[in-house]
Amino acid sequence: MDKVGIICFLILSLLSCTENEESANQQTVLIIYMIADNDLSSEAIDCIETLKSTYTKNYNCRLVVFADIKNQFPCLIEINEDGIDIITEYTDEEKKELDEIV
């Protein structure tokens, strides 16, 4: 899937986060698992920037991204209408443990 296809998929996924009567008290969380610890790291950064610039509170859901990008510590971030909040940043030791799992 090319970059444009991925971005379109993510935007459509976000648009599907709607509230109905049954889920009025529940919040939808969209989790994106983004591993780009390779030559695709620049595209992953571009994708995160695109998500940040297109996110609005009208989506009515939380957007959480686990990103493992080349030359950066893996992190768990939340994208919201105010920008990006880092939830957790993993250390080298934790990264080794994550690599063993994946």
Image: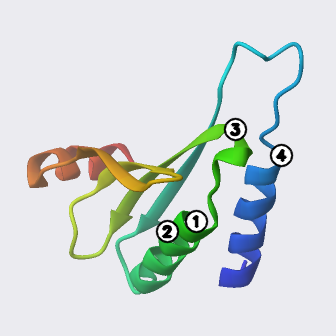
Say whether disc 4 or disc 2 marks the residue closer to the N-terminus: 4
x, y percentage for residue 76?
Answer: 36, 47
Alpha-carbon distance for marks 4 and 2? 19 Å
Task: Please state which of residues 64 and 24 is positioned toward the viewer in this rendering.
Answer: 24
Which residue occupies 35% across, 49% down?
85
Task: Please state which of residues 3 and 96 is positioned toward the viewer in this rendering.
Answer: 3
Q: Secondary structure at mark 1?
A: helix
- Looking at the rendered structure, the kind of residue marked 2 is Ile
Which residue occupies 35% across, 72% down?
37
Snapshot quadrant of residue 55: bottom right
Residue 2 can be seen in this image: no
Q: Residue 60, labelled with which disc?
A: 3
Residue at numbered disc 4: 16
x, y percentage for residue 92?
Answer: 11, 55
Alpha-carbon distance for marks 3 and 1? 15 Å
- Looking at the rendered structure, the kind of residue marked 3 is Asn
> As displayed, is residue 41 above or below residue 27?
below
Q: Residue 13, labelled with which disc?
A: none
- Looking at the rendered structure, the kind of residue marked 1 is Leu
- Looking at the rendered structure, the kind of residue marked 4 is Ser
Asked whether the beta carbons under mark 2 and mark 1 sit within 8 Å of each other, the answer is yes
> As displayed, is residue 71 above or below residue 33?
below
Q: Quadrant of the N terminus?
A: bottom right
Say whether disc 3 or disc 1 marks the residue closer to the N-terminus: 1
Say whether disc 1 or disc 4 marks the residue closer to the N-terminus: 4
x, y percentage for residue 18?
Answer: 82, 36
Which residue occupies 50% across, 82% down?
43
Residue at numbered disc 1: 51
> How packed is label 3: few (under 14 Cα within 10 Å), some, or many (20 or more)?
some
Snapshot quadrant of residue 8: bottom right
- Nearer the observer: mark 3 or 4; the answer is 3
Asked whether the beta carbons under mark 3 and mark 1 sit within 8 Å of each other, the answer is no
